[in-house]
Amino acid sequence: MNAIAIRYAESLFDLAKEMNQIEAYSKDIDLIRNVFESDPSFVLFFSHVLIEDEAKCTLLDKSFKGQVNDYVVNFLKLLVRKRRMRYVMEIIEAFKALTNEHFGILEGILYANYDISAKEVKVVEKALSKKENKTIHLRVVKDSSLIGGIKVEINNRVFDGSIKNKVALLKKELLRK
């Protein structure tokens, strides 16, 4: 991870800790991450040098004021003014890593080819929490390359229960014989 991203994430985490609002800041950062992930051109817009910083800051105010903590909005404005918005996704990931470490949480991604219900996600989280002896939080990502089943990634470990993987394993086994 980029040293710049880590430095900014640590600063935001220290502020959250000082204000005793780590959980609230974490939720705000999740919202911001969802916005920036929904359309990658947002990051390009906010890091573009030909667009005035004031216009970017005004847009941030209109977009997030009242929805996220003022300090978090001001943090985003600081990133704009310091020309660090291109690192925003890395900063978010570093901040999430710090908050997860603080709360003893492992964060992962659940890949599925279909819309999976929140209840089903909770069942998977609970099963993996028992296996890992930590609290697991999963983010759902739709992956059309999977034929069926699910795949979960947690800290570079993959739990693959997809049909695509089972077919690949079967093919490998048949080719070996």
Image (spheres, helix red, strand yellow):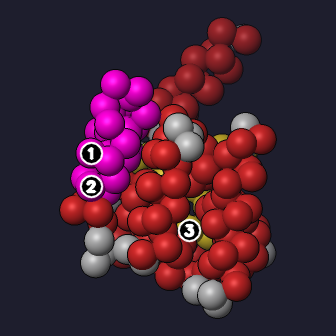
Which disc number belongs to residue 137? 3
Q: Tag 2, which secondary structure? A: helix
Q: Are marks 1 and 2 in contact (CB under 8 Å)?
A: yes
- Tell me the element at label 1: helix
Residue 22 seen in render: yes
As drawn, the label of residue 58 is 2
> What amino acid type is highlighted by mark number 2?
Thr
Q: Please tell me whether mark 3 or mark 1 is closer to you in this view.
A: 1
Label 1 Cα neighbours within 10 Å, binned few <14 / some 14-19 / many ≥20: few
- Residue 44 pos. (x, y %): 38, 30
Q: Crowding at label 3, few (<14), some or many (≥20) Cα neighbours within 10 Å?
A: many
Task: Answer left or right for 95 relative to 62.
Answer: right
Name which quarter of the figure residue 40 lies in: top left
Task: Locate residue 135 relative to residue 150 in the image: left or right.
Answer: right
From which residue to which does the magenta span run?
A: 35-60
Type of amino acid under label 1: Ala
> What secondary structure is found at the residue carrying circle 3?
strand
Q: Position of residue 155 (x, y in %)?
A: 71, 50
Query: How many numbered tags mark residues here?
Result: 3
The residue pinned by badge 1 equals 55
> Quadrant of the image for the N terminus?
top right
| Residue at the spot 46% in from the left edge and 45% down from the top edge | 80
- Which residue is painted at 74% across and 52% down in the image? 7
Q: Amino acid at mark 3?
A: His
Please indicate, yes or no, whether residue 100 appears anywhere in the rendered image: no
